[in-house]
Image (cartoon, rainbow, N blue to C red):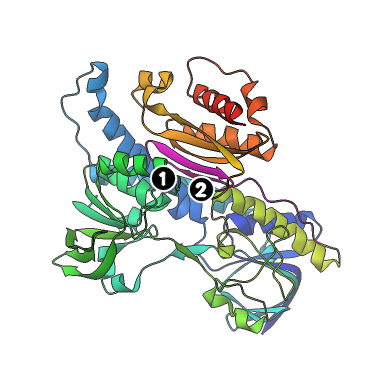
Amino acid sequence: MRELDYDVAVIGAGTAGIAAHRAAAASGARSVLIERGPGGTTCARVGCMPSKLLIAAGTAAHTARSTDLFGIRVADVAVDGPAVLRRLRAERDRFVASVFDGLGDLPDHARLDGTARFESDRTLLIGDAIRIRFRAAVIATGSSPIVPEFLRELGARVLTTDTLFEIPDLPDSLAVLGAGAVGIEIAQAMARLGVAVTVIDTGEAVAGLSEPGLVQQAAEIFGSELDLHRGAEIRAAAPDGDGVCLHWTDRDGREQVTRASRVLAAIGRAPNLEPLGLEAVGLRHGADGLPDFDRRSLVCAGAPILIAGDADGWRPVLHEASRQGRIAGANAAALAAGRAPAAPAPWTSLAMVFTHPQAAVIGAPYDPEDDGRVIGAMDFSDQGRARVEGLNRGGIRIWADRSGQLLGGEMLGPAVEHLAHLLAYAVADKQTAQSVHDRPVYHPTVEEGLFSIMSTIIQKI
C-alpha cells in the first residue's frame, strides 16, 4: 500500500473543499484535496446555476404571455422543451468547466482521486491502494437529495436535482414534493414553461418563509400558477403507465390522488457522511446524528477534524460554504502546526429563493413570542415602482429590538435579492432603523419600501 503524509487532508472538492485546500496551503500547510467525483461543485453542476437557467427560461415565457398589462399584444408563445434544456446544459457545462479549470492548476501531489474513509483519527484510506497520514482533516463532502422510501421503487420516474437537468424534454406533468426553496423554484419555472405542476408539502411554510402574512401571500401567489397543497401527507406512490400515481391526504384528511409524468423529490438534502467511516474516529455526535462541531471554528468535538459546507448541515448555501471552507482550511493548518484555531463570528444569516416574486429570510428568525421586538411591515401592492413594473405583489416584514436595532426580517416581492442584501448588511453592522432611515433613497425605487418600514419601526419604539 502506498503511504503518504500530509499536514492537512481535505475530503471533497466542492465549493467548501476547494476553499479549504487553498486556505490550508496559503497558511503554509502541506495539503491534499481528495475527490471521489463527479466534481464541479453542487452549485454549478446541479444546484444554483442550472436551476436559475430553468427559472430564466420560465420567466421569459411568462413575460411574453403577460404583456397585455402594458398594452402590448403577443399573439402566441411556444416553448421548445428540448431547446430549453439544451441551452441549460450548455451553460451549466460551461460553469462546471470553469471549476475544473481551476482544479487543473493543482500539482499532482496536491490532489488525489478516490473515495476516502477514516481508518483512525489520524489516517485515511483511499480504496485499498493508499493510506494518508494527516495532522488535521477537513470534511467537505457536500450533500445529496433525500429520496423518501416510498419513492425508491419508481426508478427513472423519480427526479432529483441530480437527474432533473439531464432529461431530454419537459414532462407533460410534474408532481413536486416540497414547497421549500428548491421545490417552489423548479415548480414555478416548470409551470411557466407549460408543465402541469402539483406541489405537495407536509408543512405550512412556502419558499422558506415563516411570517404568517407573507406565507399566506406566497401560497396565494404561487397557487395561482400551479396546484399547491400544504399540510398534506403522502400515503403511497406507484407506477402509472410511464408515469406515477400518488395517493395522499389533504390538510382536512380527505383522500386525494395525483397522476403525473414524473415526480420531483425536493424535501431537502442530507450530508454525504456515510462512506467516511466516522465510527473509526471517535467524534461526538449531536441530536441530529451529525458530528458535533463548533460553529465558529468548525472544529469537531473529539478529533483534529473540521467540517464545512453542506456536509455540516448548518447553512447549505454557496457563500457560507466558501467562507466555511476558508475558515476550516486555515484552522486545519493551525491545528497541524500546534496553534489554536480562530473562531470568527458567523455571518448574518441570508437565504434567498429566486421565484417571482423573490423571497428572502435575513438574520434572526421570526419569533411571535418575543415581546421585546417591534415589527415594521409594508405591502408591495401599492408601492410606486412595483406598480410601474406590474410586479406589485408580496410584502416585507422587518423586526428590531426596543432600541431600534435591526435584527432580521422576511421578504416576498420584486428586487428582493437586492433588498435582502441591504438588510443583511444593516443587521451585521448593528444599525438601527433610524440610521437606515437617515440614508438617501432614490425615487422611484423599490428601496423606498425599506424607508417606509424604518419609519414604522421608529414610530413604534
Q: Residue pushed farthest left?
A: 241
Nearer the observer, 58 or 364:
364
**What's the distance in space between the residues labelled 2 and 1, CA to CA?**
10 Å
Is residue 417 a member of the stretch shown in magenta?
no
Q: Is residue 209 left or right of residue 253?
A: right
The residue tagged with tag 1: helix, strand or loop? helix
Compared with 339, 285 (above or below) is below
Q: Is residue 155 left or right of residue 125?
A: left
Majority secondary structure in the magenta region: loop
The residue tagged with tag 2: helix, strand or loop? loop
> Mark 2 — residue?
368
Picture residue at 37% right of the left edge, 18% below the top: 388
| Image location of residue 79, percent across then percent down | 22, 39
| Image location of residue 273, percent across then percent down | 55, 72
Nearer the observer, 45 or 286:
286
> Mark 1 — residue?
212
| Image location of residue 126, percent across then percent down | 61, 77
Question: From the image, which quarter does the C terminus lie in?
Answer: top right
Question: From the image, which quarter does the N terminus lie in?
Answer: bottom right
Picture residue at 56% right of the left edge, 50% below the top: 318
Q: Which circle marks residue 140 in the picture?
A: none
Picture residue at 80% right of the left edge, 66% below the top: 335
Q: Amino acid at mark 1?
A: Pro
Is residue 363 a member of the stretch shown in magenta?
yes
| Image location of residue 361, percent across then percent down | 51, 44
Q: Which residues make up the magenta segment? A: 341-365
Q: Amino acid at mark 2?
A: Pro
